[in-house]
């Protein structure tokens, strides 16, 4: 496997610009730069070959490659993975079963998953395709607070599909705390309580 960076003797430029923490930064001949790396038992790595002159660092190349791979893995792990959950209905799904599957769909959407809901028509039940369409539209309407429709009910063979995607959650802004006079945080003083305090002060 070809290395992603040129190192040491594979660097062909006549002079390079050295950057980094363990050397005096500046432009060096390639021989000087290699010697500086060797003196520290490190590698000369060309990190920007298109610059004029090319930019190099004096580093431990094995450690550098490990950190690059680790960073790439972390970026992939943080990347959003779209999960598609399937929910199956029959054309004669009853209210209890509908509510049960609706609850699961709500959980999936809150977790950020997409939904592929479909009605499966067996045998002659295909004649009830209008019933299947009504069922899927009812399902989409019941989830309208959590989901948006990506594809309206569409018949494909013996199945009618509906695709839903989660809506972007809107984070409510926290309310500002009540303040006393002078801008200090604390409990608001009601007018009645304020009068009682003033009356006590006058009696004193």
Image (cartoon, rainbow, N blue to C red):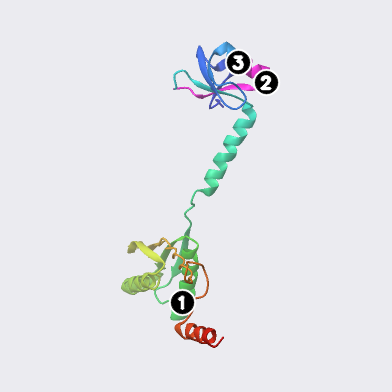
- Residue 34 is tagged as 3
Q: On residue 99, which mark appears? A: 1
Q: CB atoms at circles 1 and 3 under 8 Å apart?
A: no
Question: Judging from the image, what secondary structure is the residue with disc 2 in?
Answer: loop
Looking at the image, which residue is at 47% across and 69% down? 106
In the depicted structure, whether residue 77 falls above or below residue 11: below
Magenta includes 68? Answer: no
Left or right: 93, with 65 as reference point: left
Q: Residues within 10 Å of mark 3 (few under 14, many from 20)?
A: many
Residue 70 screen position, x and y as percent: 59, 39
Specify which label sits upstream in the sequence, 2 or 1. Answer: 2
Give x and y (percent) for residue 141.
36, 72
Is there any visible trace of residue 77 in the rendered image?
yes
User: Can you tell which quarter of the image residue 42 is in?
Assistant: top right
Mark 1 to mark 3 CA distance (whole Å): 71 Å
Residue 173, position as x, y percentages in the image = 44, 64
Is residue 43 part of the magenta span, yes or no? Answer: yes
163 to 190, vertically: above or below: above
The residue that disc 2 covers is 40
Q: Earlier in the sequence, mark 1 or mark 3?
A: 3
Visible residue check, residue 160: no
Pointers 2 and 3 in contact (C-beta within 8 Å): no
**179 left or right, relative to 70:** left
Report the residue at 53% width, 83% height from top: 201
Boundaries of the magenta span: 35-50
From mark 2 to mark 1, how far is it between C-alphas? 69 Å
């Amino acid at each position: 496997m070809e290395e992603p960076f040129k190192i040491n003797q594979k660097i062909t430029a006549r002079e390079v610009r050295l950057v980094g923490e363990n050397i005096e930064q500046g432009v060096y001949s390639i021989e000087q730069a290699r010697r500086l790396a060797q003196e520290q038992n490190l590698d000369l790595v060309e990190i920007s070959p298109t610059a004029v002159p090319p930019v190099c660092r004096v580093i431990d190349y094995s450690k550098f490659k490990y950190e690059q791979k680790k960073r790439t893995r972390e970026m992939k792990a943080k990347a959003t993975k779209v999960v598609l959950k399937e929910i199956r209905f029959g054309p004669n799904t009853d209210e209890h079963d509908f509510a049960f599957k609706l609850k699961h769909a709500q959980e999936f959407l809150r977790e950020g998953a997409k939904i592929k809901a479909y009605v499966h028509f067996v045998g002659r039940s295909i004649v009830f395709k209008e019933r299947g369409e009504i069922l899927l539209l009812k399902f989409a309407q019941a989830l309208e607070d959590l989901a948006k429709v990506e594809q309206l009910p569409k018949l494909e063979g013996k199945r009618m599909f509906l695709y839903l995607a989660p809506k972007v959650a809107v984070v409510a802004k926290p309310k500002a705390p009540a303040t006393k006079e002078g801008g200090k945080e604390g409990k608001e003083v009601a007018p009645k309580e304020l009068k009682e305090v003033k009356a006590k002060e006058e009696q004193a």
